[in-house]
Image (cartoon, rainbow, N blue to C red):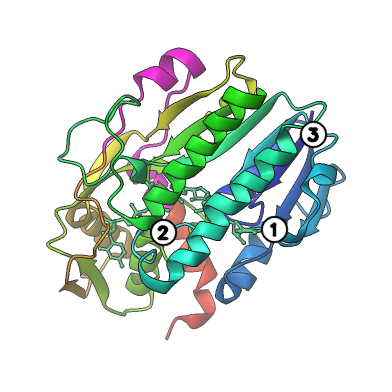
Amino acid sequence: MNIVVTGAAGFIGSHLCEALLSQGHLVKGVDQLQPASALKIKEDNLRHAIGHPHFEWHPADLLGMDLGRLIEQADVVFHLAGLAGVRNSWGATFADYLQANILLTQKLLEACKQAPRLQKLVFASSSSVYGGGGGQYNTEASPTRPISPYGLTKLAGEQLCYLYYNQYGVPYTALRYFTVYGPRQRPDMGFHRFMKNAWLDQPLFIYGNGEQTRDYTYVSDLVDANIKAMHYPKHGTVFNVGGTETASVNEIMQKIERLAGKPLNMQYSPEQPGDPFATRADIALASAELGYQPKVSLDQGLAAQWSYITALYANEKP
Ligand code: NAD
Ligand code: UGA
């Protein structure tokens, strides 16, 4: 199939491109390689895709592109481009979140409504649409009450997809990703920071008391859910995509300590506004409808990410 992946140089998008190429699809990847501080990492993310005969690379800002042209041959579009991260979405940066997560999604949907071959748009949504969490399982029917501006923009993105499905028949499926980890994880995310600082003998900053929990999803499981969603024949719905386990930050510290083979220099710092206390995915619907079942345990996934981080920062080791 002809497939367009937005956000192709990002953490998740780059893994998705590789998986699609390995299945024989023709993939067009678009990314503006932001933030500039992560440029080298993003170029590295696409190392295996660029040069592949079935990969067409567009290093560009989607907001300035003719999206109708970009997707005119597409059978499937995966929309992963966006501005992620719950804690950074307050204050003046909210304008960037609006642009990346709402305005861009609407622009893409306008193009999708005219795309002659489009069979599926898969939209990257987020567990942050649910809110703070009391540790209970969230089903897709749970109330959506974001506690961060970022969560609000992802919920708006989902609602826009529904609007264009309802009024114009745009054939979409949205996936609510729960905290994704593994090689290439964004440098601003928890495991990346913890492992980098453990490896470089620097302090690890834990927000709050470290008892907050996440449903952690290994990136290959998430990619599998995306590919299953691309083949899903029904449209206009949303699925949770969680992992094999939940864990608190304190539990993660113990696991990283074992991987590092030395005591960690942990520093507890204030809780961050917009940071949920607990996230937990009920994946019964994704399991029943998509056949999704996460496979990678936290110990396996953390070990793979540790190998990636120690190689990435090998030259910075004092
Ligand atoms: P990422 O930052 O690594 O990738 C997103 C990419 O989108 C970036 O490389 C960025 O350059 C690109 N992009 C943004 N705006 C663009 C534009 N206007 N034109 C071209 N490219 C643009 O993030 P990620 O962690 O891989 O997340 C991918 C998607 O999944 C995001 O939409 C995010 O909100 C969502 N998500 C991620 C997680 C997670 O745990 N990582 C969880 C829930 C949802
Ligand atoms: C992640 C993504 O970054 C969001 O874009 C996404 O929307 C969200 O998952 C989701 O599931 O929807 P988050 O859960 O905050 O957000 O992921 P991490 O940055 O990896 O944080 C994981 C945990 O580590 C959080 O409990 C956080 O409080 C903690 N943390 C993170 C720290 O204690 N210290 C740090 O330096 C970083």
Q: Residues within 10 Å of mark 3 (few under 14, many from 20)?
A: many
SS label for mark 2? loop
- Residue where numbered disc 3 is placed: 74
Q: From what the image shows, is residue 203 above or below residue 171?
A: below
Q: Residues within 10 Å of mark 2 (few under 14, many from 20)?
A: some
Residue 101 counted in the magenta span: no
| Disc 1 Cβ-to-ligand 1 distance below 8 Å | yes
| Nearer mark to the viewer, of 3 and 1 | 1
Question: Upstream in the sequence, badge 2 or badge 3?
Answer: 3
- Residue where numbered disc 2 is placed: 85
Residue found 37% across the figure and 56% down from its top: 149
Residue 302 counted in the magenta span: yes
Quadrant of the picture in which ligand 1 is shown? bottom right
Q: From what the image shows, is residue 265 above or below residue 96?
A: below
Query: How many numbered markers are drawn?
Result: 3
Q: Measure the C-alpha gap from mark 2 to mark 3.
A: 29 Å
Q: What residue type is disc 3 on?
A: Ala
Q: Which mark is residue 63?
A: 1
Residue found 20% across the figure and 42% down from its top: 133
